[in-house]
Amino acid sequence: MQLEFAPALVLRGNGVERRLGCRVLQSPLAGVSDRIFRALVRRWAPDALLYTEMVNATGLELGHGRGKLEDLATESGPIAVQLFDHRPAAMAEAARRAEAAGAFLIDINMGCPVRKIARKGGGSALIRDPELAAQIVEAVATAVAIPVTVKTRLGWCGGGDTSDDPSTSETAARAVDWCRQLESAGARLLTLHGRTREQGFSGQADWPAIAAVKRALAIPVIANGDITDPETAWRCLAETGADGVMVGRGTMGAPWLVGQIAAALAGLPIPATPDPRERLALAAEQLQALVASRGEKGLLIARKHMGWTCQGFAGAPQLRHALMRAATPADALALLEQAASALP
């Protein structure tokens, strides 16, 4: 079924306008959404907005994390840079660097539930300090010409919901207040994960609360949480009225998912899910690219990707077990080739 959307979402920054024609976004994923992963996603989703891994503004000051910004301008399609920190000035300077590197837009992470991020005042910790959060958005929006967006959650913790209508629950009301402050501070688009920080990734995403935020805001709202295939994407959009969806953990080992959902929402033929032989070839290609880019560390990074990708065929559990123990890239490639030759 095709959804009725305007031809593009138009985001206006401080002098620069960005247009998003694809309503399916690939979530920034720490340790996952590097340049090599993005290139794979791009095969199936040529127009989707993809994101870098989170970039620490403090790290950039100290000379770390610059590799995440390298060659952004040479990648095909729009690439956003997601930043996190608790200091407005540092975030503004990091945004300038990201813009100079070729970022399509700047996204501010105000939703990461990881303790080591929140403990330092970044990510979801900013939900508890809305005044500081607004200062950060204002500082970044003033520092760059491209649009500034925010990815966040419904709140810090849940509970206290007594309404029979979930869209008017206490959680939804708090989320509306929180997101209105971000909009007023200068956010041009909001991606909202339908869980609180306390929930992490457990329980069911609260789509009615996202719907309440969408109704309250004038800027575009992207729904995030529990979107795993075209069917759940369609239901989420129908229930929330959101302007698009962001797909996160479901793409780990499945870089084709964003493209499949985008095609389904546009009423186009849905690309086929790769068969086992194609998955093994994809795992081998990603392994070789990571080793070429990261040296010996590339094998360590590739292990998780191979574990996610090598699914759904006879012998897959045994293969994953062996891949996690492969001592060299050559050993891992040999295992993948043996698995492919054993397929019917």
Image: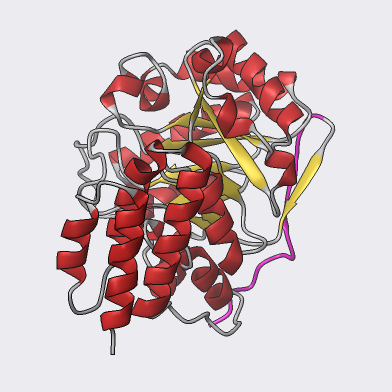
- Residue 155 placement, left or right of 142: left
Q: Is residue 31 above or below residue 289?
A: above
Could you tell me which residue is drawn at 64 percent across and 62 percent down?
22
Q: Is residue 301 above or below residue 234?
A: above
Task: Give the main secondary structure of the magenta stretch.
Answer: loop
Q: Is residue 191 above or below residue 129?
A: below
x and y percentages locating residue 276 in the rendered image: 34, 78
Nearer the observer, 163 or 66: 66
The reply to whether residue 20 is in sight is: yes
Quarter of the image for residue 122 reads top left
Nearer the observer, 222 or 270: 270
Could you tell me which residue is drawn at 70 percent across and 54 percent down?
77
Nearer the observer, 6 or 309: 309
Color theme of the render: secondary structure
Quarter of the image for residue 118 reads top left
The reply to whether residue 226 is in sight is: no
Residue 2: say if magenta.
yes
Could you tell me which residue is drawn at 73 percent across and 19 percent down?
142
x and y percentages locating residue 197 in the rendered image: 29, 33
Q: Residue furthest bottom?
A: 344
Q: Is residue 59 above or below residue 239?
A: above
Residue 5: say if magenta.
yes
Q: Which residues are magenta?
A: 1-14
Could you tell me which residue is drawn at 17 percent across and 74 percent down?
315
- Residue 181 placement, left or right of 161: right
x and y percentages locating residue 46 in the rendered image: 65, 63
Q: In the rendered picture of this protein, how many numbered marks are placed on residues?
A: 0
Quarter of the image for residue 20 reads bottom right
